[in-house]
């Protein structure tokens, strides 16, 4: 995710990790900012506030070998003026591999981009 024309991602994480899938194990759970109900609806929901002033861009990249169908819904609000004293949401995922570790499988990438520019009334 990119806020306000950022050149580098403000949020960059594997989809499962971002939505709380620990160790690749999908389980139903509910918390204040995240919910997951994969058995019935296969739905991952995020309720973190993610304010921006001008625009937001969401990119979803498939680095796996299988083609995936993704449904998404982004709920947003517009305001007459930029919000003051509001922090922007940032998240970065990283992993450190030990010496001698190997990566299994090849990577094919495809990308979905969703962009929303805020419409301000004057």
Image (cartoon, rainbow, N blue to C red):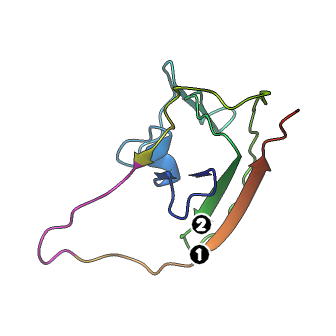
In the image, residue 26 sits, relative to residue 63, either above or below, namely above
Magenta: predominant secondary structure element? loop
Give the Cα distance between marks 2 and 1. Answer: 5 Å
Where's residue 57, x and y in %? 67, 54
The magenta segment is: 92-101
Where's residue 44, x and y in %? 60, 37
Residue ranking furthest to the left: 99
**Tag 2 and tag 1, C-beta contact below 8 Å:** yes
Residue at 78 percent across and 48 percent down: it is: 117
* Residue 7's disc number: none
- Taking depth in this image into account, of 113 and 50 the one nearest to the observer is 50
In the image, residue 57 sits, relative to residue 102, either above or below, namely above
| Residue 99 forms part of the magenta stretch | yes
Q: Quadrant of the C terminus?
A: top right
Residue at 80 percent across and 27 percent down: it is: 80
Element type at mark 1 = loop
Residue ranking furthest to the front: 122
- Taking depth in this image into account, of 96 and 68 the one nearest to the observer is 96
The residue that mark 1 highlights is: 109
In the image, residue 107 sits, relative to residue 1, either above or below, namely below
The residue that mark 2 highlights is: 62
Say left or right for 18 vs 39: left
């Amino acid at each position: 995710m990119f806020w306000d024309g950022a050149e580098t991602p403000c949020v960059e994480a594997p989809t499962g990790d971002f939505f709380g899938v620990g160790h690749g194990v999908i389980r139903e759970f509910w918390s204040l900012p995240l919910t997951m109900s994969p058995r019935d609806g296969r739905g991952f929901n995020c309720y973190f506030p993610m304010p921006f002033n001008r625009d937001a861009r969401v990119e979803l990249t498939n680095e796996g070998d299988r083609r995936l169908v993704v449904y998404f819904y982004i709920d947003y609000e517009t305001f007459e003026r930029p919000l003051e004293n509001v922090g922007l949401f940032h998240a970065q995922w990283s992993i450190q591999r030990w010496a001698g570790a190997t990566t299994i499988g090849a990577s094919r990438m495809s990308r979905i981009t969703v962009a929303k520019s805020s419409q301000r009334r004057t």
